[in-house]
Image: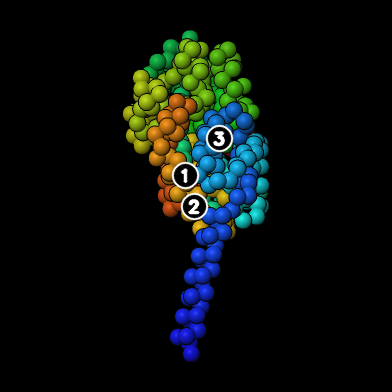
Amino acid sequence: MIRHALLALAASLALGASANAQDTARDTRPIRWLIGLPAGSGPDLLTRLLTERLATRLGRPIVVENRPGAAGNLAAAALARATPDGTTLGTLIAATMAINRHLYPEPGFDPARDFTPISHFASFPGVLLVYPSLPIETPDDFVAWVRAQPQPPLCATSGAGVVPHLAMAWLMREIGARCEFVHYRGSPDAQRDLMAGRVPVMLDGLPTSLPGLTSGRTRGVAVTSLQPSALAPELPTVASRMPGFEALSWIAVGGPAGLPELFAAQIETAVAEAMADPALPARFRALGAEPAASGRAALAARIVAEDARWGALIREVGITLDR
């Protein structure tokens, strides 16, 4: 009797899985795609390039909705609250998944509980920038300059708690010095003040740094990837002087917790297929980003590892939203 019941249950589950797979394949409802960064930012442009390909592969329209604010927390909280029915996805960013819970008392979501991570799809290094008139051309020059300052230098960031802010704090700790951080609401304002000489130093993402670098209005000193960037091959890595130093901003596809397994697998496959087309990675690299398609297991592992690393740095250095 028990054996017959188990066989009947197995058959029922198999039929249900088959039906769910067919429903997933037939679903043509629009997908709302949330991103916690402004339109026109590097991650926004990369997201839109990816979603164009995904919409074609899925046969479903995708509408990107920008909800900037609170270092990505507003969009992340909205994604966490969304119904997990396959109609809402979003761009997960390093700040919301591995940093913000250590800085914000109530971010509005739990990174470990409230999301279905699906696939990392791009990352980009930071670049240490200085005002061009400073006597700094190499990492050693920068270390010597910082140590010679009678007061901590002003260091611009694109926002408190973002990866470049933490990377700069980490770099200064390794040097044995500190910054007087000036937090801006995004890269454009910070870059503008750097180009005008109102702040002498900034660490920012490579995509938003390229215009100033190529025009000569800022000077690059080093990148925060382990290997030199193909877009700025003349710049050494911080790791060449401080082994193991790596600080990458990354973006990924995710959904609310409880997303149906078959749908999550379908999106993971669609991202991998999109990235297998050489045209899309080429567009990503032109924007200063390194394309990826890591899948769910690798993304989940990355989130856990970076949460531990950045959390430890925040506690050791005493980083807050004010400094």
Residue 271 disc label = 1
Q: Which picture quadrant has residue 273?
A: top left
Closer to the N terminus: mark 1 or mark 2?
A: 2
Residue 266 disc label = 2
Q: What is the residue that sits farthest to the bottom in this orientation?
A: 1
Relative depth, front residue between 33 and 222: 33
Closer to the N terminus: mark 2 or mark 3?
A: 3
Residue 48 disc label = 3
Disc 1 marks a residue whose amino acid type is Val
Any part of residue 315 in sight: no
Callout 1 crowding tier (Cα within 10 Å): few <14, some 14–19, many ≥20: many
Instruction: Residue at 40% x, 40% y: name it.
Output: 276
Callout 2 crowding tier (Cα within 10 Å): few <14, some 14–19, many ≥20: some
Relative depth, front residue between 35 and 309: 35
Closer to the N terminus: mark 3 or mark 1?
A: 3
The residue tagged with tag 3: helix, strand or loop? helix
The residue tagged with tag 2: helix, strand or loop? helix
**Alpha-carbon span between mark 2 and mark 3:** 19 Å
x%, y% of residue 168? 49, 30
x%, y% of residue 142? 42, 20
Callout 3 crowding tier (Cα within 10 Å): few <14, some 14–19, many ≥20: some
Instruction: Residue at 56% x, 54% y: name it.
Output: 26
Q: Which picture quadrant has residue 281?
A: top left
